[in-house]
Amino acid sequence: MSIESIAGAVTAQKQELVQKEVSVRVLKMALDAQAAQGAQLAQMMDQSAGLGTRINTQG
């Protein structure tokens, strides 16, 4: 194996690793955004149903 082929293989491996890391970061960002949207939706649903807007003092 020549030095050029080894260097090429190492470069290809590094590029693949970087691509995988970027893909994971993008996936994490998408999941975080989806979780935040889900939390906002749950809060809006609670507010629209009147939950948490007043205290029941009759008992």
Image: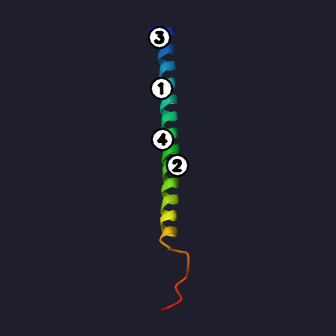
Q: Amino acid at mark 4?
A: Leu
**Distance of label 3 from label 4 (alpha carbons):** 33 Å
Residue at image coords 52%, 19%: 11
Residue drawn at x 54%, y 89% as measured from the top left:
57
Q: CA distance from mark 3 to mark 2?
A: 42 Å
Looking at the image, the residue that sits furthest to the left is 1
Residue under label 3: 5
Tag 1 or tag 2, which sits nearer the N-term?
1
Q: Residues within 10 Å of mark 4 (few under 14, many from 20)?
A: few
Please state the horizontal and vertical placement of residue 3, each as a whole percent of the image: 51, 9
Number of numbered labels in the structure image? 4
Judge whether 22 appears above or below 42 on screen: above
For badge 2, the amino acid type reads: Ala
Residue 10, given in percent of the width and then of the height, sits at: 50, 19
Examine the rendered structure and indicate whether residue 56 appears above or below residue 24. Answer: below
Q: Is residue 28 above or below residue 19?
A: below
Q: What residue is shown at x 48% (from left), y 50% (from top)? A: 34
Q: Which residue is mark 4?
A: 27
Q: Earlier in the sequence, mark 1 or mark 4?
A: 1
Q: Residue at x 48, y 47 (%)?
A: 31
Q: Nearer the viewer, mark 3 or mark 2?
A: 2
Crowding at dot 3, Cα within 10 Å, few <14 / some 14-19 / many 20+, comes out as: few
Dot 1 corresponds to which residue? Answer: 16
Query: Label 4 near label 1: C-beta < 8 Å?
Result: no
Q: Secondary structure at mark 2?
A: helix
